[in-house]
Amino acid sequence: MTWEANVLTLYPDMFPGPLGQSLAGRALGEGLWSLNTVQIRDFAADKHRSVDDTPAGGGAGMVMRADVLARAIDHVMERCPATPVLAMTPRGKPLSQALVRELAAGPGVSILCGRFEGMDERLFEGRPLLPISIGDYVLSGGETAAIVVLDACVRLLPGVMGAPTSGEEESFEAGFLEYPHYTRPFEWEGRTIPEVLRSGDHAKIAAWRKAKAVEDTRSRRPDLIERHGDARRTPPSGAQREDEG
């Protein structure tokens, strides 16, 4: 069954964009996933195809109307009832690798792209939306954020990456940053590859990678350590399972 993505947007020409290149683009061409865009303006009721209005209580900018967005969402939910609907908004739940894996394991995803000052809050009360944010910053619209979500999901679909285990030893898979990587040449600008990586001793390499992952996470993302507990107890990859097996 093909993994299906639906994007509700005011700018359908922004898609597939980067998703038409590299791994995602090749997978799209091979039918491993599908991409459909829904023009939100098609669900406006007036001749001007209005999708926004002035904010209640006053203030700058415009707000996307709940009635127009609801009709667009209902259209997608009727066609894909099993697909969760995400709403890209800075006020949403932070995107995580765990959520990405959950979405990639399902039938697909529908994504509502916000614009202007945001969406009428009643929409989140009236429809089963999952508000999602990709970071603590503000973009011009949700389209770029939707591309991020889709790229993260598509690369995990079966057959997209070359090796089935390619997505296992990565940052955030066990809650921590991935260990650093090296390749040829052995020496570059006076800097050499760590000797342990050239030793051929897989147990020592696994231990080194685990230690470096913990070290880098502590120095660069201490919030991950606080969130997931003692990193020394949990490997960043499958190294410990292989040692124990």
Image (cartoon, rainbow, N blue to C red):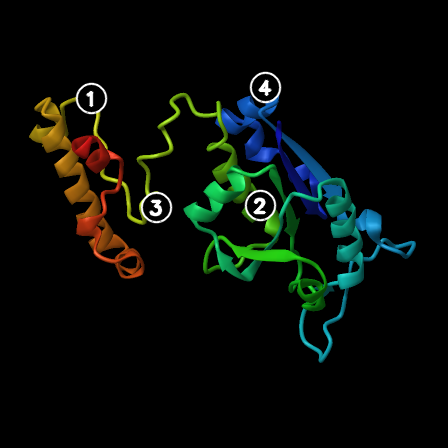
Give the Cα distance between marks 4 and 3.
28 Å
Along the line of sight, the residue nearer the viewer: 165 or 92:
165
Q: Secondary structure at mark 1?
A: loop
Residues tagged 2 and 4 counted as in contact (Cβ below 8 A): no
Residues tagged 2 and 3 counted as in contact (Cβ below 8 A): no
Q: Secondary structure at mark 2?
A: helix
Q: From this view, report whether residue 151 is shown above or below residue 172.
A: above
Give the Cα distance between marks 2 and 3.
20 Å
Along the line of sight, the residue nearer the viewer: 56 or 48:
56
Drawn side of residue 225 relative to residue 97, left or right:
left
Q: Is tag 2's residue or tag 4's residue first in the polypeptide sequence?
A: 4
In the rendered image, which residue does mark 3 sit on? 172
Amino acid type assigned to the residue bearing label 4 in the image: Glu
Amino acid type assigned to the residue bearing label 1 in the image: Arg
Q: Residue 83's spot in the image, x, y percent?
A: 64, 43
Q: Is tag 2's residue or tag 1's residue first in the polypeptide sequence?
A: 2
Disc number lying in front (2 or 3)? 3
Q: Residue at x 13, y 37 (%)?
A: 207
Q: Residue 220's spot in the image, x, y percent?
A: 25, 53
Amino acid type assigned to the residue bearing label 3 in the image: Phe
Give the Cα distance between marks 3 and 1.
26 Å
Q: Report the quarter where the C terminus lies.
A: top left
In the rendered image, which residue does mark 4 sit on? 30
Q: Report the quarter where the N terminus lies.
A: top right
Q: Would you call the spot at circle 4 few (<14 residues within 10 Å), some (14-19), or many (20 or more)? A: few
Q: Residue at x 47, y 48 (%)?
A: 99
Mark linked to residue 146: 2
In the rendered image, which residue does mark 1 sit on? 184
Q: Is tag 4's residue or tag 3's residue first in the polypeptide sequence?
A: 4
Q: Would you call the spot at circle 1 few (<14 residues within 10 Å), some (14-19), or many (20 or more)? A: few
Residues tagged 4 and 3 counted as in contact (Cβ below 8 A): no
Give the Cα distance between marks 1 and 4.
33 Å
